[in-house]
Amino acid sequence: MNAVPIVDALHETHWPRGLRAAGPAEAGFDPERLEQAIALLEAEIAAERLPGAVVVIARDGKVAVHRALGWAAVYPERRPMRPETLFDLASLTKVIATLPAVLRLIERGDIRLDDPLHLFFPEYQGEGREEIRIRHLLTHTAGLQPFSQALRDPSRPREELIARIATLPLEAPPGTRIIYSDLGFILLGELVARVSGQPLERFVQEQVHGPLGFTETGFLPTGERAARAAATEYRERLGRYQCGEVHDETATALGGIAGHAGLFSTAPEVAAYGQMWLDGGAGVLSPAMVAAATRDQTPHIQGPEHRGLGWIVAREDSESLSCGDLFSPGSFGHTGFTGTSLWVDPHRRLVVALLTNRVHFGRTPHIIRLRPRFHNAVAAALR
């Protein structure tokens, strides 16, 4: 085993809007117990089950922890993780870019949750497709397939790949099952562009990330930003490990910008985005929209998982959530395949951004067990 490098950047970080350095005690944590949560990450890295991580834990806007642990890259050579390391957020793109963009369109009166998809995509007719509503796409209840290999062909034009989604058979009637679908959020990203007249990345920058003062969050990093990204997976077709490039194959085929994946950011800005939701939208979204997006929108659907708009929503009967067993009912969050996650507990005013590059070691499922254990330890450290 190699010694795990650790950098504590709590008081050196220029905190985004809504957050400030405090420390565990001032933020309402038992410092020793909170260190036990961090020790879980350190142990995973020391055992070489995880390359590295950057974590930000805040309560009511007071940051208790900002720690970088382990390695931003192990192959082809070791590069220590830094507090400012950039991460491929993978499916956190859904809730940090596409979701707020769609919600802004709703608030502006451009669209409604129960507008049928075919108002904007006329090809969605027949075999039940005409029943798909915007609400269904946001709650993963449209009946769409999770993904399609047919969309992972970078030789085909983007417009052709998007059009292929309409030809795929539905897996369930709209509104009857939760089927987590990248395809639904790809369509939502395209919806933002069609309705706003701007590409998704420009609309979300102008409407969400810019007003929040974010400087690190965006698509297609280049230059110095790409160079300090955490490395992800080895790609046979490239003959190397990826770094600063989109990991998701479908997003890659779509040019690196898509509604389901492709966003990059840092732990402080991901945590600040979570804090925006605790702060009633912080002027970016309205309190009414925050309330609608974070309540259970799928109470009629049986199963262990429930959905708000975009978010996973914890209930008393929820099972196997990545936030563990101790977060309050009504907590909301999301994960990303590369090893990222954001969870918000509004009852305890708690935000936990845990960004890792777990796919650098391949697709072993260690992160699935680590996440709930880590979040349990964080929640247990609250006073």
Image: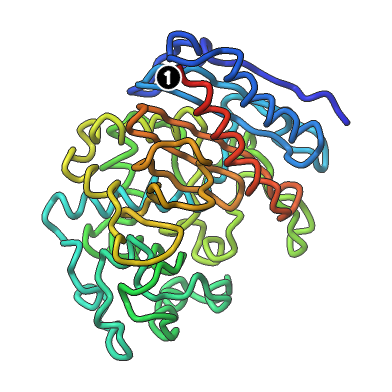
Identify which residue is drawn at 39% across, 29% down.
Answer: 272
Q: Coloured how?
A: rainbow
Measuring from the top left, give residue 326's x and y in whole percent: 48, 36
Residue found at the very far right of the displayed protein: 1
Q: Amino acid at mark 1?
A: Trp
Question: 365 and 243: which one is in front?
Answer: 365
Quadrant in which the N terminus is drawn: top right
Quadrant for the C terminus, please: top left
295 left or right, relative to 336: left
Residue 134, picture quadrant: bottom left
Left or right, 116 with respect to 234, comes to left
- Lateral position of residue 237 relative to residue 106, left or right: right
- 88 lies above or below 177: above
- Residue bearing mark 1: 15
How busy is the neighbourhood of tag 1: few (under 14 within 10 Å), some, or many (20 plus)?
some
| Residue ID at (34%, 42%) | 330
Q: Quadrant of residue 339?
A: top right
Foreground residue among 210 and 97: 97
Residue 26 point in image, percent of width and height: 43, 9
Residue pushed farthest bottom? Answer: 126
Measured as percent of width and height from the top left, residue 147 is found at: 51, 71
User: Which residue is found at the position 33% from the left and 48% from the top?
Assistant: 202
